[in-house]
Image (cartoon, rainbow, N blue to C red):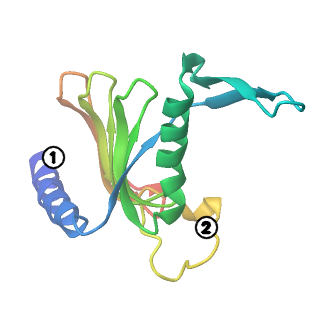
């Protein structure tokens, strides 16, 4: 029975991915950004230190990361690839701003796939504010992988509730 479920999931995944190829793809960074800037009131000269996950970076790098992350607001919907501060792909999928709303893949730090699944789509009815209970709702088949790529387990969700 597991083989049948897996085959159905693979064909669903292929169909789902192809339907999302028309979306804009954006890259974002899931990290802590800190700017400690002090300005001299008499000269107007500002000096600062900029950090990405407690690692000092240049002002130019800081501005680049902030600009990349500001694209989240234009994601209605889009395909997001979310990287760590060390530029490792953490997860990707269809999002509506920062709300998962479609196909979803998560990765180990090695780059190996950790999870494949689907979040319930938000749909066109949400043109305004997205509330937390609209986001990240697991729906359908979710496959979890071991570090070596073998399947650890398969779960089936319906509207966020585990059914199998």
One can see residue 131 in this view: yes
Q: Nearer the viewer, residue 39 or 57?
A: 39
Q: Horizontal and vertical percent for residue 51?
A: 60, 23
Which of the 4 image quarters holds residue 133?
bottom right
Q: Which residue is mark 1?
A: 2
Going by the image, does 154 lie left or right of 97?
A: left
Residue in the picture at 69% in, 24% down: 48
Q: Nearer the viewer, residue 19 or 117?
A: 19
Q: Nearer the viewer, residue 162 or 110?
A: 110
Q: Horizontal and vertical percent for residue 101?
A: 43, 62
Q: Horizontal and vertical percent for residue 110?
A: 27, 21
Residue extending farthest right: 42
Residue in the picture at 19% in, 57% down: 13
Compared with 122, 7 (above or below) is above
One can see residue 136 in this view: no
Which of the 4 image quarters holds residue 158?
bottom left
Residue in the picture at 25% in, 22% down: 147
Tell me the number on the disc at residue 130.
Answer: 2
What SS does tag 1 mark? helix
Compared with 26, 130 (above or below) is below
Tell me the number on the disc at residue 46.
Answer: none
Residue in the picture at 37% in, 41% down: 91
Q: CA distance from mark 1 to mark 2?
A: 36 Å
Residue extending farthest bottom: 125
Going by the image, does 92 lie left or right of 63?
A: left
Going by the image, does 129 lie left or right of 14?
A: right
Q: Horizontal and vertical percent for residue 145?
A: 26, 32
Q: Earlier in the sequence, mark 1 or mark 2?
A: 1
What SS does tag 2 mark? loop
Across the whole image, how many numbered discs are drawn on residues? 2
């Amino acid at each position: 029975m597991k083989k049948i479920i897996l085959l159905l999931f693979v064909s669903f995944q292929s169909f789902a991915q192809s339907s999302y190829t028309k979306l804009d793809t954006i890259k974002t960074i899931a990290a802590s950004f800190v700017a400690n800037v002090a300005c001299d009131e008499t000269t107007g000269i500002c000096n600062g230190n900029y950090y990405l996950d407690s690692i000092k970076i240049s002002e130019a790098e800081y501005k680049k990361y902030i600009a990349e992350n500001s694209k989240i607001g234009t994601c209605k919907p889009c395909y997001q690839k979310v990287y760590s501060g060390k530029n490792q792909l953490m997860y990707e999928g269809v999002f509506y701003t920062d709300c998962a709303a479609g196909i979803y893949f998560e990765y180990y730090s090695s780059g190996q796939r950790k999870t494949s699944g689907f979040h319930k789509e938000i749909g066109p009815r949400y043109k305004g504010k997205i509330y937390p209970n609209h986001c990240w709702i697991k729906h359908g088949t979710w496959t979890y992988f071991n570090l070596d790529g073998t399947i650890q387990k398969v779960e089936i969700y319906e509207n966020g509730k585990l059914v199998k």
